[in-house]
Amino acid sequence: MTQARYRLAFYGDDFTGSTDALEVVAFAGLRAALFLRPPSPDVLKHFGDIDVVGLAGVSRSMSPAEMTEHLEKDLRYLASLRAPIVHYKVCSTFDSSPGIGSIGRVIEIAKSIFGDTVPIVGGTPSLQRYCIFGNLFARSGTDGNVYRIDRHPVMSVHPVTPMNESDLAVHIAQQAALRIEKLTSPVLDQGFEAAARRFNDLAEGGADAILLDSVNASQLTQVGRLIADWAGVSGSAFVVGPSGVEYALTQWWREAGVIPPPSGAYGDPAAIDQVLAVSGSASPVTALQIDAAVRAGFAEVPLDAAALLDDSQTIAVARQVVGRAVSLLKEGRSVILHTARGPNDPRIGKMIGMLVSGGMSRELAKHEGGRNLGRKIGQLVSDILEEVPLKRLLLSGGDTSSQVAQLLDIDALEIEARVSPGVPLCRAKSIRGRLDGLQIAFKGGQLGDEEFFKRGWLGRVQ
């Protein structure tokens, strides 16, 4: 493994997940860069010697047909880098469906490129996501309790991909015709030799994928060793899972002496005069964070999602929003734009109703509405930054983060600091220069504590 130019390559199914994986490897002491599109040799050369190459994608919002058209090219690019391990990074709650963000379809595509059995890492204990006997449990950001994922107060009622099955092997097998076996906690606790024998037996028996439990750091280190061993046996390993994959590998590499202890170079973000925060998330966790941001002094600019998506209104509404935000920013205020304050915000129903009245099914309206709204918000942010060259941007929501980043003129991201676990503050790299050095945090709807936006502005206030 150490003879390869890159130690690891990964594809994130959205931007919030991509920066989560980037954070883990950077905090472990590895040099890493996250690219917004497959980098040319010249762009890679610009970044010098790096250990990990990441590619930020948007496949979480793709249909299986879109994955076939777009994702296969990106995975073939990552395969061409000849890293011993290629990771497809999913959300730690595995929310997906046969029609949207299908993890099963990803595995089918990957097997046509990489061949062998695909390990699936189920848990990320550091983010309070636990997988035991294949069943996923996750902490809720609204009450602090841990729930089986199909009983989770937020993820079980996700507006696009509700999780109604906790057994991840069953959940993913519902998305594609795959044989998924499990390697469970009791086997992991028997030690590496027993776990490796079981893994190899399952692979030789024809498993398309093997779901690996992980309920604590010790088990996750075992999982990292199994993945590294499988990469050595098969020549390369394609792995599916959340940032638990990066935690597993870096923990094992450190225990094995392959990488040194982390340097501790990344701390809390420094306070800054003002920031622009943008939320396209309807999560109740994000609603609490918006409330706290307003109390801390952010000026809020509510966004009318339905009007932004209405062709007859979008130009006028966008001009009004940009004008209001620019005016507040020029006054020295920090500003937060938001499309919803929680799942019961009437703006959500208004947007879906408008799309349904135009001929969409309700399910399609939820999916396409979120994706198209993300694009509109991305253009708003780009227009605002044209007028006010800010130093820091805070983004919440997977579609919002992905679409904003795609519209900004940046090439890659590197880690700057940590706002909260799983949510790093990144530094934009732009060879063309205008946004080079812009600091951006990408936050999934369920991540971060109540003070997220405030901390992203003022640092860690005692």
Image (tube, rainbow, N blue to C red):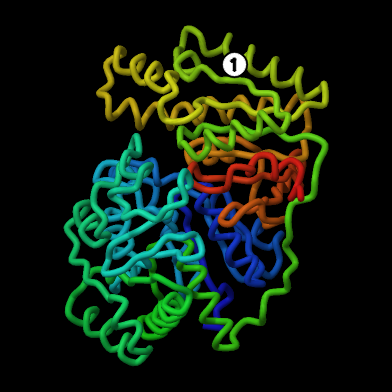
Relative to 253, 282 lies left or right: left
Relative to 32, 271 lies left or right: right
Closer-to-camera residue (370/428): 370
Q: Secondary structure at mark 1?
A: helix
Query: How far across and down, in percent of the image, does residue 165 sit?
Result: 24, 52
The quadrant holding residue 193 is: bottom left
Tag 1: amino acid? Ala
Relative to 53, 91 lies left or right: left
Query: How far across and down, in percent of the image, does residue 200 sit?
Result: 27, 84
Closer-to-camera residue (432/353): 353
Relative to 457, does residue 210 appear above or below in the rendering? below
Relative to 129, 27 lies left or right: right
Relative to 261, does residue 303 appear above or below in the rendering? above
Query: How far across and down, in percent of the image, does residue 278 sit?
Result: 60, 32
The quadrant holding residue 396 is: top right
Closer-to-camera residue (31/282): 282
- Residue lying at 44% horizontally and 23% vertically, measured from the top left: 345
Residue ID for mark 1: 318
